[in-house]
Image: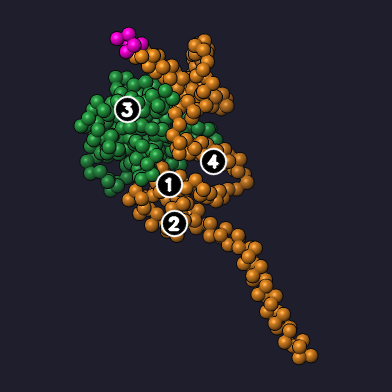
Amino acid sequence: MASTAHRRLLQEYRALTNNPPDGITAGPMSEDDLLQWEALIQGPEGTPFEGGIFPAELKFPKDYPLAPPTMKFLGEIFHPNGMCCPHLPMGRYRRKLINIASVRPRLHLHPASPGDDPNHYEHASERWSPIQSVEKILISVMSMLAEPNDESPANVEAAKMWRDRRAEYEQKVRDGVRRMLGL
Amino acid sequence: MADEQISLPSLILIVVLGGLVVRYLFFSSPAPASQQQPREAAVERIQQMFPQLDRRTILWDLQRTGGSISATTERVLSGRIETPPVTFQPPSPPRSPANAASSATARSHQQKPAVPKSTEPDLITRYNLQSRISESSGGAENGDSVDGKGKAWSSNRDERQSALQRRRDEMIIAARRKMEAKIAAERAGTGSQ
């Protein structure tokens, strides 16, 4: 399996190991399958997510980097663009899938194929392209924790609370962070 | 003579019928195997469209929609796809003996996150760090030196794997210690007031 995806992922893994960005640990779950990664993202300082660690799963398509990976938070995270309440059976997958399209700075994980433009506001330059990388995705997701984008919430409940009852939202996030650490 | 003439065709009939019954009762399992081919193709197609869905969920939904790709796609898009019950055991994916070992490990890795999903344990439980938590602060210092060493890229893949594992563990333990200290400080603050 010495494909382009394999080589590229190994190269990115190497860069992330030698030069890890602050608060990010990422790599394949096992080198038997380089298309399945696991990442830990630290909650950014100065936000209610501060001190928290959030595990996420990245799945790469066979034609990566032509097509983008999908990312999913594995544990509980209460965020307008993330998901909450994973025990709810309804719409579980939609809630769990982080809406990376709303990441700031905008980073769209859609393949940049012409005509495939479900969100009409986006420019081609903002969509996924092979020059993006795992590191850029993870850093964008981290910055999104600090600055939710309420234009396209994945978790409507969290988005409403973030907008209308900020104190309650921050408390809920802090409680979640502690629960994740087993405290 | 008349008896023999009647019994020969009826004997053949009985043998054929008996054979069919035996085949139906005991050899019905190869039939689904031939059905499995289109089912696998359907799973693959849906997985291409929705990589976030796992195989088990797709199979469960396909079973409920009678193997219809379009019906399942419709259900995924409208968010009506459901989590399969724990009792649902999908047939294991067909694989050649050559890559059986690697796909077995891949499968165990796929199942690893699937278990915490249902219970949502904290990170300590998820990464089996209970024993590390109870270690003294001396253990943390030891961990720091290991962490520094583990940052370099190793040419040995097992070393790389364990270095990554170590960095993950250290990150979680460091965060947990920091949070413990913060909670202790908060408690002391409210206690003295």
Q: Residue at x 47, y 25 (%)?
A: B124
Residue A161's disc is: none
Q: Secondary structure at mark 4?
A: helix
The answer to which of marks 4 and 1 sits earlier in the sequence is 1
Tell me how far mark 2 sits from mark 4, CA to CA. Answer: 24 Å
**Label 2, on which residue?**
B64
Label 4 chain ID: B
Tell me how far mark 4 sits from mark 3, CA to CA. Answer: 33 Å
Residue B83's disc is: 1
Label 3 chain ID: A
Q: Secondary structure at mark 3?
A: helix
Q: Position of residue B19 (x, y in %)?
A: 67, 71
Q: Which residues are magenta?
A: B188-193
Q: Amino acid at mark 3?
A: Val
Q: Secondary structure at mark 2?
A: helix
Q: Nearer the viewer, mark 4 or mark 3?
A: 3
Q: Amino acid at mark 4?
A: Arg
Label 2 chain ID: B
Q: For residue A60, which quarter of the picture?
A: top left
Q: Nearer the viewer, mark 4 or mark 1?
A: 1
Q: Residue at x 49, y 37 (%)?
A: B115
Q: Which one of the lettered chains is coloured green? A: A
Tell me how far mark 4 sits from mark 1, CA to CA. Answer: 19 Å
Q: Amino acid at mark 2?
A: Arg
**Label 3, on which residue?**
A173
The answer to which of marks 2 and 1 sits earlier in the sequence is 2
Q: Which one of the lettered chains is coloured orange? A: B
Tell me how far mark 2 sits from mark 1, CA to CA. Answer: 12 Å
| The stretch drawn in magenta includes residue B192 | yes
**Residue B48 visible in the shown view:** no
**Label 4, on which residue?**
B107
Q: Are marks 4 and 3 on the same chain?
A: no
